Image: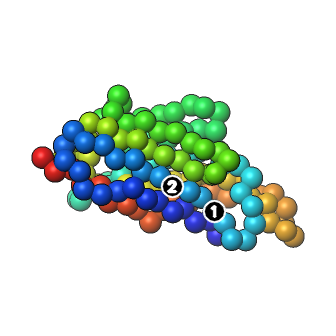
Amino acid sequence: QVQLVESGGGLVQAGGSLRLSCTASTTSGTIVSINAMGWYRQAPGKQRELVAQAISDGRTNYADSVKGRFTISRDNTKKAVYLQMDSLKPEDTAVYYCNADRLLIFRSGTGIRSENDFWGQGTEVTVSS
């Protein structure tokens, strides 16, 4: 199984900044590569939505609502993804979830296999007005 551990959420005033971090790991093998790592968020009473995604080839995608304010980055060596959130607004308040998709994992006995769609436990971001 693959674990995604997030950190960096908290309470901040509007206009402030936060940096979220997420690291992927497995206790039963080695993660060889991760195609896509990203951040989603879910506000109370709303559906989960994509915030930003970073693909292994360098491409990034952002929700229109965060373009120019949020920056996603990856450290492939550490199997980590980060989200720098600046100029935060109260409407950014949500639980933020890390996602990793299309992983290549080496396990002894089975070799390298593709495993897909893993989620972190979520980290809460609250922006006060």
| Quadrant of res 62 | top left
Specify few, some or many for label 2: CA neighbours under 10 Å numbering under 14, 14-19, or 20 or more: many
Which residue is depicted at the point 35% across and 56% down? 9
Q: Which residue type does callout 1 highlight?
A: Ser
Judge whether 110 appears above or below 128 on screen: below
Q: Where is residue 4 drawn, in percent x and y?
A: 54, 62
The answer, for residue 46, to whether it is visible in the render is no
Judge whether 94 appears above or below 64 on screen: below
Judge whether 121 appears above or below 43 on screen: below
Q: Quadrant of the N terminus?
A: bottom right
The residue positioned farthest toward the top in the image shown: 68
Disc 1 to disc 2, C-alpha distance: 10 Å
Q: Do the residues labelled 1 and 2 touch (CB within 8 Å)?
A: no
Which residue is depicted at the point 39% across and 47% down? 19
Which residue is depicted at the point 19% across and 43% down? 14
To which residue does mark 1 refer? Answer: 25
Q: Where is residue 90 drawn, in percent x and y?
A: 19, 46
Q: Where is residue 80 drawn, in percent x and y?
A: 57, 50
Depth check: 52 or 102 in front?
52
Depth check: 23 or 47 in front?
23
The answer, for residue 91, to whether it is visible in the render is yes
Depth check: 41 or 129 in front?
129
**Of helix, strand and loop, which one carries label 2?**
strand
**Of helix, strand and loop, which one carries label 1?**
strand
To which residue does mark 2 refer? Answer: 22
Q: Which residue type does callout 2 highlight?
A: Cys
